[in-house]
Amino acid sequence: MWNKTLFGISLLALSLAAQDGLKVSFPADAPISVVSSGWGESRAIARGGAYVVDVRTSLKLKNNSRLRLRGISLQVSSQEVAAGGKASVSVPSLDVYPGQEFPVKIDLRLLQPNSGSGAAVVQVQLDGVLFEDLSFFGPNRLGSRRQLTAWETEARRDRQHLRLILARNGEDALRRTMLDVLARDNSRPKLDVRLARSSATLANSRNIETAFLAQPDLPVEGIKAVAVSSGNQLQILELAFENRDKREVRSIELGLLVRDQEGREFSAGSLPAAMSMKPKGGASVQPSANVTLNRPMGLPLKVESLTGFVQQVEFANGDVWVPPSAFRDEARLNKLIPGSLEEQRLSDIYRRRGMPALLEELNRQ
């Protein structure tokens, strides 16, 4: 019986590979084209009334625009409705010249109902691309414009910060900075954070203390937060903000810090919140976000208090604000908040390839 099952799975995988179950479709006017695609090492296994589809492949794309490409986001789906049928792949910190080809790796798992057709089909669609002048193309169904712009803004901030260290104090200072970054990454308290949406209030919950970090030159200020906890679950019931800026606000991303019964603090990720705020106006949102928190080895973390800080602000005109590099210089935050994707990428270049490779990367415009 076991051998027959394995044989059936192998036939299914071979059938999918032969049929090329990966379908890539970009808009006709997209500045990015598909050079090559294929099922690669992807596999689909029938389990009950569904397929478990492991998508493991790489696309080769081409930049057909006149601008250098900085980031791309793709929507990958096996079906649109049920949970587990959609995912996304985003690649920031690119530097793809006009006419240049580049790979995008896809490695994720999807679920697809078994329709009886004997084949699993995965659709890959373009959600958005960001260029060097921060212009954007794409349907933006997944909010890619905000995220790609934020990542690029953070990357420029962090690269400029490291360049200033190098220019003012030399390679030794830059080396010490990178060693500090690597040390913080290794020593930062680890926490498993799972975010879910729920309109039902937590059972046996209690109100917890909430606060917002003081941040200079904020375009948006947090003025109220209501949260409850029950065991290792945290639920944010309401957030209220004031817009200090002259531009209309479209969304906010709030960073979260939690404190347990023993007074230890942890980063609990971030919470995006779509809200419309007119210039100098205010707004509130009821996110009903449930956050489950566990320490390593699955040990639950009992939340005693919550502190929020503004991590991103997206304006209606497409601009995105992120905190200045000095924001994380305070020792408490440096020990808790993970660095940006760009900081992690640069520190990994330094760790694997040394100072010459880092200097070459920082010299790139």
Image: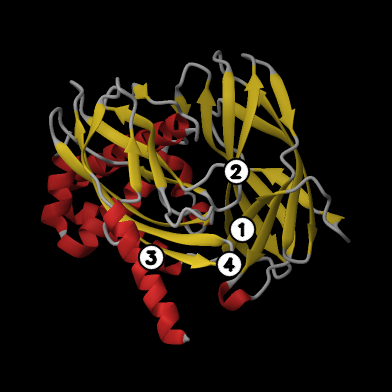
Q: Neighbour class for label 1 at 10 Å: few (<14), some, many (≥20)? A: few
**According to the image, label 2 marks what residue?**
81
Q: Distance between the residues labelled 1 and 2?
A: 21 Å
Q: Quadrant of residue 275?
A: top right
**According to the image, label 3 marks what residue?**
12
Image position of 264 with respect to 16: above or below? below
Which amino acid, mark 1? Arg
Coordinates of residue 190 in the picture (x, y in percent): 52, 67
Q: Distance between the residues labelled 2 and 3?
A: 24 Å
Residue 140 visible in the displayed image: yes
Which amino acid, mark 3? Leu
**According to the image, label 1 marks what residue?**
194
**Numbered badge on residue 48:** 4
Query: Which of the pair 314/279 is nearer the observer?
Result: 314
Image position of 113 with respect to 81: above or below? below
**Numbered badge on residue 301:** none
Q: Earlier in the sequence, mark 4 or mark 3?
A: 3
Q: Distance between the residues labelled 3 and 1?
A: 34 Å
Which amino acid, mark 2? Val
Coordinates of residue 128 in the picture (x, y in percent): 38, 31
Coordinates of residue 292 in the picture (x, y in percent): 67, 60
Quadrant of the rendering where the C terminus is positioned:
top left
Q: Earlier in the sequence, mark 1 or mark 2?
A: 2
